[in-house]
Image (cartoon, rainbow, N blue to C red):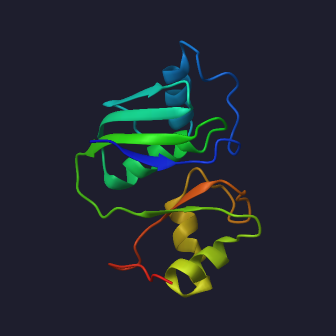
């Protein structure tokens, strides 16, 4: 069963023509590999509505989530159908869509109750994030559990 993770179609890194392109899967894999994420055993396909389907097996829950985010945060992608299993178990992260005016500190305050924990979110989104001050509206970020649980506000 595939779960659909929504993304903001107008936000993200542009890769040129992706949809309707015979090389779409290769472009997506190249994007994922540009972050040194492991794609062995992972297949991707793109439909005309901007939905990317990822299938196969990822090395870990963290790798699975980073693969989903690296393809989802591409301009033109409206969602990712998650058909990935993992070789090693792990706790699933939450996803947060950045809104205008958001900072990692504000996001940490919302999810963890403490703004100073923003490095946890920054580290969870490396290597896609290179600077904690460079997030943009529409970007989707991983919000990992904080020592066994996140604070829901």
Residue 105 vertical placement versus 96 (above, below): below
Determine the image quadrant of residue 84: top left
Residue 61 vertical placement versus 34 (above, below): below
Residue 38 location, x and y as percent? 40, 38
Name of the residue lying farthest toward the right = 101
Viewer-closest of 135 and 82: 82
Asked whether residue 36 appears in the rendered view, the answer is no
Viewer-closest of 62 and 137: 137
Asked whether residue 55 appears in the rendered view, the answer is yes
Name of the residue lying farthest toward the bottom = 113
Q: Residue at x 57, y 48 (%)?
A: 7
Residue 23 appears left or right of 131: left
Residue 108 appears left or right of 89: right
Residue 82 location, x and y as percent? 37, 42
Q: Residue at x 69, y 60 (%)?
A: 131
Residue 123 location, x and y as percent? 53, 64
- Across the whole image, how many numbered discs are drawn on residues? 0
Determine the image quadrant of residue 115: bottom right
Q: Looking at the rendering, in which quadrant would you find the N terminus?
A: top left
Residue 101 vertical placement versus 14 (above, below): below
Name of the residue lying farthest toward the front = 49
Determine the image quadrant of residue 43: top left
Q: Residue at x 53, y 39 (%)?
A: 71
Residue 62 location, x and y as percent? 38, 55
């Amino acid at each position: 069963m595939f779960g659909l993770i929504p993304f903001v179609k107008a936000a993200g890194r542009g890769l040129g023509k992706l949809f309707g392109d015979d090389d779409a899967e290769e472009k997506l894999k190249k994007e994922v590999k540009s972050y040194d994420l492991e794609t062995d055993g992972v297949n991707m396909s793109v439909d005309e509505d901007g939905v990317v389907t990822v299938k196969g097996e990822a090395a870990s829950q963290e790798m699975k989530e980073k693969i989903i985010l690296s393809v989802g945060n591409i301009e033109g992608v409206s969602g990712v159908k998650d058909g990935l299993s993992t070789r090693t178990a792990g706790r699933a992260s939450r996803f947060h869509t950045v809104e205008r005016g958001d900072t990692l500190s504000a996001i940490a305050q919302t999810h963890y109750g403490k703004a100073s924990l923003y490095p946890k979110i920054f580290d969870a989104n490396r290597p896609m994030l290179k600077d904690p001050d460079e997030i943009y509206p529409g970007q989707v970020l991983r919000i990992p559990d904080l020592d066994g649980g996140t604070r829901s506000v």
